[in-house]
Image (cartoon, rainbow, N blue to C red):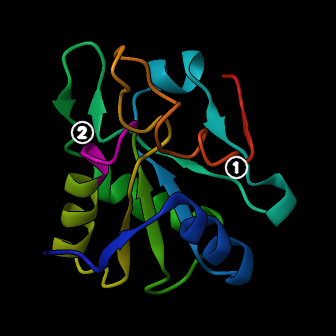
Amino acid sequence: MSYAGDVTCKDCWDVLRDSSDAQLIDVRTAAEWAFVGLPVLKELGKEILLIEWQSYPTMEINTGFVSQVSSALEQVGAAGDVPLYTLCRSGARSISAAQALTAAGYSTVYNVLGGFEGNANELGQRGSVSGWKYDNLPWRQG
């Protein structure tokens, strides 16, 4: 594993709540943010960092991802090597994002297992098996 590790959505929420430095980076596409929804961290006094790992519709890797994360961290006053949690739809793209951030020198980067919508059920529907929404963590529609 070339990043700090995997955590559940609930464990991620707990760390975000208990650590003023920890940051959540949603690496899904802008289309997903707009049409599927977003985690809400308002009660924690935080804002989610929205930085695409891949861009819709081509799904090309965002070559500026690491520098955009660095800029976003600076803007929210997160100095140094703070705990970072990457989140995507189901926990796959966020692994790649966590690996890229780790390769760039961030040492405490975690992948959020299950992602925002989780794995698909037997009918191919998401949100009913695992993930942020399934765990009833705060979220809103786009």
Q: Which of the two discs, 2 and 1, sits closer to the camera? A: 1
Q: Residue at x 43, y 85 (%)?
A: 81
- On the question of residue 40 being in view, the answer is yes
- How would you classify the magenta stretch by its main secondary structure? loop
Q: Identify the residue at the far right of this view.
A: 43
In the rendered structure, the answer to whether residue 127 lies left or right of residue 81 reads right
Q: Which residue is identified by label 1?
A: 137
- Above or below — where is 19 with respect to 32? below
Tell me the tag on residue 62: 2
- Above or below — where is 104 with respect to 105? above
| Quarter of the figure that contains the C terminus | top right
Q: Residue at x 75, y 46 (%)?
A: 138
Q: Position of residue 125 (x, y in %)?
A: 42, 18
Look at the image and give the residue range highlighted in magenta: 89-94
Element carrying mark 1: loop
In the rendered structure, the answer to whether residue 125 lies left or right of residue 44 reads left
Q: Residue at x 56, y 71 (%)?
A: 11
Magenta highlight on residue 30: no
In the rendered structure, the answer to whether residue 42 lies left or right of residue 6 reads right
**Nearer the observer, 74 or 110:** 110
Residue 58: name its quadrant. top left
